Amino acid sequence: MPVKNVFLLIEDNLIDQLVIKQLLKKVLCIDEVHITNNGKEGIEWLMTNGKRYPSIIIILDVQMPVMNGFEFLKAYAKLDSELKKGNQIYVLSSTLDPDEIKEISESIYVTNFLGKPFPIEEFRNKIYLNI
Amino acid sequence: MFIKAPGNQLLTNKYKTMLKFTFFKRLRCANVFILLLIVFVSCALLICINFFTIKTLSATRAYVNGESHYSKGQKDASRHLITYLYTKDPNQWKLYLEELKVPQGDGIARMTLLKVGDNKVARKGLLTGRNKEEDLDDLIWLFDNFKQVSFLAKAIKEWEQGDKLIFKLYIIGQQINAKIKKNILTTAEQQKFLHDISIISDKLTINERNFSNTLGEGTRQIKSLLIITNIFFILIIVCSVCLYYSIMVKRLIISKKEIEVKNENLMIVNHELDRFVYSASHDLRSPITSLKGLIEITQLEDDPNQIRKYLSLMNQSLAKQDRFINDIIDYSKNKRYEVVMEPVSLMEIFDEAIAQLMHIENANRIKFTKELLIDEIQSDNLRLKIIVSNLISNAIKYADNNKQEMYVSIKTYFIDGFHKIEVADNGIGINDEYKDNIFKMYFGTNKNKGSGLGLYIVKEAVENIKGNISVSSQSNIGSKFIVTIPHAYAS
């Protein structure tokens, strides 16, 4: 059963962008994935396009130049609550730093923390649970 | 991720402070030993002075005691002689002789001590003078050592005069005894003898009083001298101990502060190390996770063209990891290896670096120009290689593909006593907002292209060879890095 949601991918690594996009397409049959290269671009995308969609699933990388995942979450918290309604944020990172993982998990906007490479099966089960 | 590793400047400062500390430590060490010596010597002196003073005072007391026996003996002898003079009782004569022995014994002792010093005769004389046996040593010791000292010399003189009077009394006694034995004593003679005895007795009383007073005065002088010296030395000891204590406390405080600073530094270093390990592990892992993802999507792909594209991406991912590992190795070499000054050919370093970097995408489209006014310099080969290789690699990686002609221009020249290496390009340039951060560890504007370590390592390497690096850049126009190396420096 395909999931019909809008996806926003915030990730600076071009290979990872491709991998996640392909996995979403091949496994979950999702064609509409919007790609931004860092947190700042992600926020900008949400501000211009957020209102058009009732709910957005955001896949967020942590280590990015310009605006990293933590800074994105801070900026996201300041967004209009109308924009945030119905959204889910999945943080995706290859970090092993327990401090970072803890900080991510404690954010109220974060639905789940996922380790790289993108665990597509785990992701599918989680979004079915949460929708 | 911004991580600031302790720079060389910090280390040099630390070294200077350490030198300062050792200098003061040496100074303070000497001070402490001098203080301890002062305390030790003062204590020893105080013990000696107190010992001898107490001995002196005890001896003087014994002399005063002896004097009272002397006087008593003399007075009793006079009394018995007078009684004998009137009663002619032979018992009184015997008692007279008995009592007279006391001052006579003292007299013998005095003469012996003056002429030959300590011997049995002197001791026996003193014992006859009813001095206590336990006091004898002190009495003789004081006499021997202080007979020249004014107060005792004066007392001895009084004693000598007293002895002369005692001898007169003895002569009178003999005359009286002879007359009584022959029964030729007249009343007039009785009166005369009585008169003589009382004159002698009066004179003796004066001598005896003077003797006691002189000794008493000496004792009082000694006592005040003793108090002053005691106060003096005790003050010295107390001051020295206080000083010693305060130095020790100061030193403890200083070392405590040093330890606290060291601890803090260690904690910072530890924390940095932790961050470094996590960052490094993240950066080492990320190409692997990319690779894993690529394999996963390759397995789902049927189109051979797509698969070929994925394979090329896998290759890129591995190349990225390889570069990162190389960067880490450079970082560690730069930290660990000693700077070795040797003749280095800049031409060779540039050629080698360019040859090694030609594999980077689009590198063959870039035109390299070299203008080397200086080739051979005295410097560290490893550091120069790291610097040059990273700067050229950056120039290639951040070339502007939209430009018709891409170039990297390399120049070396000598100006104002410094060697300069210039690497300029017409690449994408650096945004003004990033310029302050480009030399920081793990700073990178595009992790697809670099590890974020390159320029940090360059800066460390430049500092290691006592040079500096500056950058001028304009977004979309190009960047120019200038490395300044001192012409001659003592390492």
Image (spheres, coloured by chain):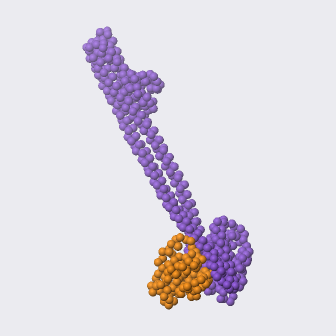
Chain colours: A orange, B purple
Quadrant including the C terminus of chain B? bottom right
User: Residue A122 lies in what quarter of the image?
Assistant: bottom right
Q: Nearer the viewer, residue A3 or A70?
A: A3
Residue at the bottom extreme of this rendering:
A52
Q: Residue visible at 58% across and 66% down?
A: B11
Q: Can residue B90 be seen here?
A: yes
Q: Residue at x 32, y 18 (%)?
A: B96
* Most distant residue in the top direction: B182
Q: Is residue A45 above or below residue A69?
A: below
Residue B284: quarter of image: bottom right
Q: Report whether B168 appears left or right of A60.
A: left
In terms of depth relative to the viewer, which is nearer, A119 or B33?
A119
Q: Is residue A120 left or right of residue B97?
A: right
Q: Quadrant of the N terminus of chain B?
A: bottom right
- x 39%, y 34%: residue: B57
Quarter of the view holding residue B157: top left
Q: Is residue B17 above or below residue B37?
A: below
The percent coordinates of residue B288 (x first, y second) are 63, 75
Q: Position of residue B177 (x, y in %)?
A: 32, 13
Across and down, in percent, residue B65 comes to: 35, 29
Q: Nearer the viewer, residue A26 or B420?
A: A26
The residue lying toward the viewer, choosing from B391 and B448, is B448
